[in-house]
């Protein structure tokens, strides 16, 4: 009888292990190693989530949500995730494309309502796909918080928004691209951008988050901290969750869209971001819910230039020997990453609300170290 009982326990252990559940005995070591990384990079707080074979096998939050009140970070707290937000815009475009409402080859001028042409190459059409892949030849030299900067009727220096090379010729990361994409989503769908993403992406997946600050529980917002390397001090940045109520009250649908920052304004928890990531890992489907077609998802993950697809980047620089797909984010002191391996079906989300990082590198070194700890302890 005792032997049979032990045999059953052993079989249960194997079932849990191979089904993708983490082994509890591993967790203290994971957390100890991550805490060492946090100390090395002086992280304020950190939330992580690990996915294996479609299941979230590990979630944990470390450190502080708010330094001033000494409030601990929790798994349900939400961050402004910065540029990972771009993939939500691209996912929305795929939905509208599948509905026959637009094409990736469409002229952006026709979609957005004013002329979009590089003055050095006036005969070259700038397409929607070029915006999504950062190959449009646009730049952020004039800023990107309003479409006025690129609208010839609003800005006498509109030509400075364009680089010297021809559209489609080079990759150059540009936030203005995606504030324009968000505007196109709004004009084509007839819905305000933030409401479209909530109704068509977040709600079907059962995710809590969004772009409109006032529509979310402010008690869940994680304070973001800018690090000053000279003084080695942190300063909270209130702009991360600016509700912009006056701008929204005077909102012009189909033009004021940058108020919600399609390029970087999504607020969501690491756990819910991991669910969204899993949808992309399974090529448009999470559980029984399909958000976009498999063909569209493959298109998003297919590099156009420099490893960048349609708001998803392919890179072998995060985990040795693994080619990963995803996106990073950085703004207001926050650093975020969401990367998955589409064939082996594992993925990692990591977000910190402040750390002492080196600049001009592909991945935030602190988050890269965290990702490798999670891979080595829970996935390898």
Image: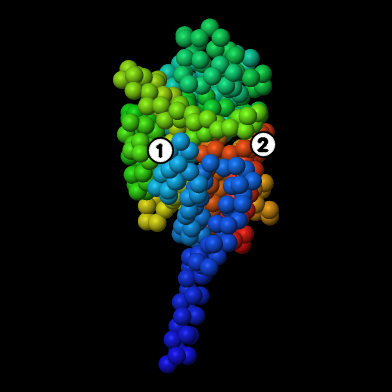
Q: Is residue 262 visible?
A: no
Q: Residues within 10 Å of mark 1 (few under 14, many from 20)?
A: many
In this view, the residue in front, 314 or 358, is: 358
Query: Relative to the observer, which residue lies in front, 294 or 369?
Result: 369
- Residue at left 54%, top 51%? 348
Where disc 2 sits, the SS reads loop
Mark 2 Cα shell of 10 Å, populated few (<14), some (14-19), many (≥20):
few
Q: Which mark is residue 221?
A: 1
In the rendered image, is residue 267 in sight?
Answer: yes
Q: Earlier in the sequence, mark 1 or mark 2?
A: 1
Q: Residue furthest top?
A: 156
Q: What is the x, y in percent for residue 81?
A: 48, 38
Residue 178: % across, % down: 50, 29
The quadrant the C terminus occupies is: bottom right
Distance between mark 1 and mark 2 Cα atoms: 26 Å
Q: Which residue is mark 2?
A: 358
Q: Residue, x 50% and y 66% (percent of image)?
A: 24
Spot occupied by residue 234 in the image (x, y as percentages of width and height): 55, 33
């Amino acid at each position: 009888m005792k032997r049979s009982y032990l045999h059953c326990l052993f079989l249960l252990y194997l079932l849990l292990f191979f089904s993708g559940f983490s082994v509890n005995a591993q967790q203290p070591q994971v957390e100890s190693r991550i805490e060492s990384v946090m100390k090395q990079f002086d992280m304020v707080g950190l939330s992580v989530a690990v996915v294996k074979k479609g299941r979230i096998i590990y979630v944990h939050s470390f450190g502080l949500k708010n330094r001033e009140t000494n409030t601990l970070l929790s798994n349900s707290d939400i961050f402004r995730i910065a540029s990972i937000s771009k993939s939500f815009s691209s996912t929305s475009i795929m939905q509208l494309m599948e509905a026959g409402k637009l094409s990736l080859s469409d002229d952006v001028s026709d979609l957005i309502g004013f002329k979009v042409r590089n003055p050095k190459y006036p005969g070259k059409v700038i397409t929607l796909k070029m915006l999504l892949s950062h190959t449009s030849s646009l730049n952020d030299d004039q800023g990107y918080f309003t479409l006025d900067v690129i609208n010839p009727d609003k800005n006498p220096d509109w030509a400075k928004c364009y680089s010297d090379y021809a559209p489609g010729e080079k990759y150059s990361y540009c936030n203005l691209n995606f504030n324009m994409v968000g505007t196109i989503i709004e004009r084509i769908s007839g819905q305000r951008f933030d409401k479209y993403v909530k109704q068509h992406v977040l709600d079907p997946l059962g995710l809590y988050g969004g772009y409109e600050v006032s529509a979310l529980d402010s008690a869940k917002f994680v304070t973001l901290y800018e690090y000053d390397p000279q003084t080695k001090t942190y300063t909270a940045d209130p702009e991360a969750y600016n509700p912009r109520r006056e701008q929204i009250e005077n909102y012009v649908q189909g033009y004021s869209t940058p108020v919600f920052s399609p390029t970087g304004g999504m607020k969501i928890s690491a756990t819910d971001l991991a669910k969204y990531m899993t949808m992309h890992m399974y090529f448009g489907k999470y559980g029984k819910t399909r958000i976009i077609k498999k063909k569209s998802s493959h298109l998003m993950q297919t590099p156009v230039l420099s490893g960048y697809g349609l708001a998803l980047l392919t890179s072998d620089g995060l985990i040795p020997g693994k080619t990963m797909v995803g996106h990073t984010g950085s703004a207001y002191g926050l650093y975020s990453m969401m990367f998955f391996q589409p064939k082996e079906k594992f993925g990692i989300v990591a977000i910190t609300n402040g750390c002492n990082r080196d600049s001009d590198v592909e991945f935030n070194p602190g988050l890269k170290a965290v990702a490798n700890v999670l891979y080595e302890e829970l996935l390898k």
